[in-house]
Image: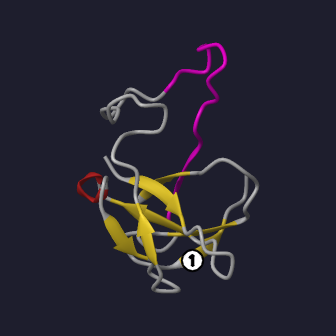
């Protein structure tokens, strides 16, 4: 299942959508080209969740993830935590404003 990572470099900080096979590897940021070390497991130490296993709104202490569609290619994207109003699609590489 694709997942979102944020470039850790202060001059970039853009979000990218990566495929599961990138976990545990070093990838290149699509924007600034700096290397990014990707965690090998799903955050929290649990295995990567399967489709349809996102936390429900009634799970205590676990925030729900909001999903938006890329306006350019319609790829569903999970919004990362925080209030960043811009997102970059990992499929078509287009950046767009997120309205929540």
Image coordinates of residue 54 in percent, x first then y, are 45, 29
In the image, what residue occupies the spot 64% across and 13% down?
Answer: 60
In the image, what residue occupies the spot 51% across and 84% down?
Answer: 31
Q: Is residue 56 magenta?
A: yes
In the image, what residue occupies the spot 48% across and 55% down?
Answer: 77
**Which quarter of the figure has residue 63?**
top right
Q: Relative to 51, is 35 above or below? A: below
Q: Secondary structure at mark 1?
A: strand
Overall secondary structure of the magenta section: loop
Residue sitting farthest toward the right: 83
Q: Is residue 86 left or right of residue 71?
A: right
Image coordinates of residue 62 in percent, x first then y, are 61, 24
In front of the other: 62 or 99: 62
Q: Relative to 24, is 14 above or below? A: below
In front of the other: 1 or 42: 42
The answer to whether one can see residue 74 in this image is no
In front of the other: 42 or 50: 42
What span is colored magenta in the figure? 55-70
Image coordinates of residue 66 in percent, x first then y, are 59, 42
Residue at the disc numbered 1: 95
Q: Relative to 55, is 33 above or below? A: below
Q: Is residue 61 magenta?
A: yes
């Amino acid at each position: 299942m694709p997942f979102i990572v944020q470039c850790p470099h202060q001059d970039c900080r853009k979000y990218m959508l990566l495929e599961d096979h990138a976990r545990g590897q070093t990838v290149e940021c699509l924007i600034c080209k700096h290397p990014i070390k990707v965690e090998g497991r799903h955050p929290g130490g649990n295995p990567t969740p399967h489709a349809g296993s996102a936390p429900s709104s009634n799970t205590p202490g676990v925030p729900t993830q909001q999903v938006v569609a890329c306006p350019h290619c319609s790829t569903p994207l999970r919004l990362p935590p925080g209030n960043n109003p811009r997102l970059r699609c990992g499929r078509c590489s287009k950046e767009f404003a997120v309205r929540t």
